[in-house]
Image (spheres, rainbow, N blue to C red):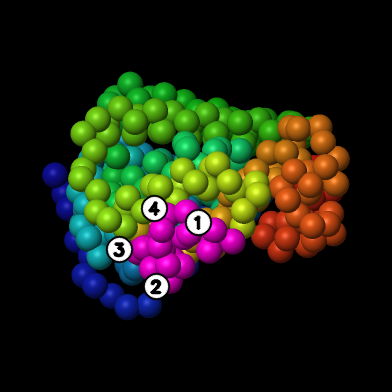
Amino acid sequence: MALRTYTPGSRRVDKISIQRIKRALHDVSYFSDDLAFAALTAETNPTEHASKSIDGSAVIIMMTGEATLQINLKSYTIRPGSIVFFSPESIIRTERITANATGYMLAYSRSFINDIQVGLSTSLPIYMLFRKSPVLKVTREETAEILQLFQLMKKLMHSGKQRYLHEMVRSLFTTAFYLIAEINSRSQEQPAKQGRCEVIFDEFMALLEQHCRSERNVGFYADRLGLTPKYFSAAIKEVSGKTAARWIDEAVILEAKTLLKYSGKSIREIAEALHFSTQSFFGKYFKQHTGESPSRYKHK
């Protein structure tokens, strides 16, 4: 089995964007600059010469061969039956790869994932799983199921359909996400013992699901947990890599998007349901975090 080994190169971390993936890879299908599905080989491996970071996120399914990837300075051996997840913060380098290595990559932008309607109770375990260990073991049947969804997304990208293409692609992506969540839930039957900060984080997530419509202040959650805001914020950042304020904003925006798309309520009614003092304040908050107005998001 032939091996290709890469020696350390520049310490500079190179960003790989969806646009760059579209240009650099031969067998690639894409959905504007938000989603790209590509076949990978040892020859087309995008992390072969230097440390790279995805400008967004990516999922890789290994089909044949073997590779050793360094992800955030830790080495992982990837074989068939592995799904690898790269978050926007991941620093990736290929240490070694066999010549017969092949796989598939689905890369997606931050804006794409922000439009996916998945609740915290589902997305949080996936986020935490891949943050701690970016490689998930799957069976041959599970690999086939996920790949079928990816291939159907690819087929739609080439279909010429326009009117409901966004909705169809996002629905398939969401289905794949829930399938991975199901695999994760079955693989976590014996959860590891949690440290103090992880317990605080889990309790915060439970409170956030319950109160995010009405409470957007970090101090509220710290107080409910009997902690000082400083200690609380440090614990959340240590466990998740995100600030408590960012988690609160993301939860509020997720609720807002769900209400805008599916509740049938007016924007004024949604602003009231989320306890914003005025519709104007809600509109500014929503646009600050999404780049578009509530009205445009509701009707696009």
| Alpha carbon separation for disc pair 2 and 3 | 12 Å
Chief secondary structure of the magenta portion: helix
Q: Amino acid at mark 3?
A: Asn
Above or below residue 49? Residue 132 is above
Q: CA distance from mark 3 to mark 4?
A: 22 Å
Of marks 2 and 1, the one in the foreground: 1
* Relative image position of residue 175 (x, y in whole percent): 52, 29
Q: Residue furthest top?
A: 141
Q: Nearer the viewer, residue 239 or 53?
A: 239
Which numbered disc covers residue 13?
A: 2
The residue that label 3 is drawn on is 72
- In the drawing, does residue 82 fall left or right of residue 287? left
Amino acid type assigned to the residue bearing label 2 in the image: Val
Disc 1 on helix, strand or loop? Answer: helix
Q: Which mark is residue 221?
A: 1
Q: Earlier in the sequence, mark 1 or mark 4?
A: 4
Q: Position of residue 193 (x, y in %)?
A: 20, 45
Of badges 1 and 4, nearer the viewer stands 1
* Structural crowding at the residue carrying mark 2, measured as other residues with C-alpha within 10 Å and reported as few (<14), some (14–19) or many (≥20): few
Left or right, residue 4 beside residue 244: left
Q: Which amino acid is tagged 4?
A: Phe
Q: Nearer the viewer, mark 3 or mark 1?
A: 1
Q: Nearer the viewer, residue 179 or 211?
A: 211
Tags 3 and 4 touching, CB below 8 Å: no
Mark 4 neighbour class, 10 Å CA radius: few under 14, some 14 to 19, many 20 or more: many
Magenta range: 217-238
Q: Which mark is residue 201?
A: 4
Q: Of label 3 and label 1, which has the lower sequence position?
A: 3
State the SS at label 2. Answer: loop
Within-10-Å neighbours for mark 1: few <14, some 14–19, many 20+: many
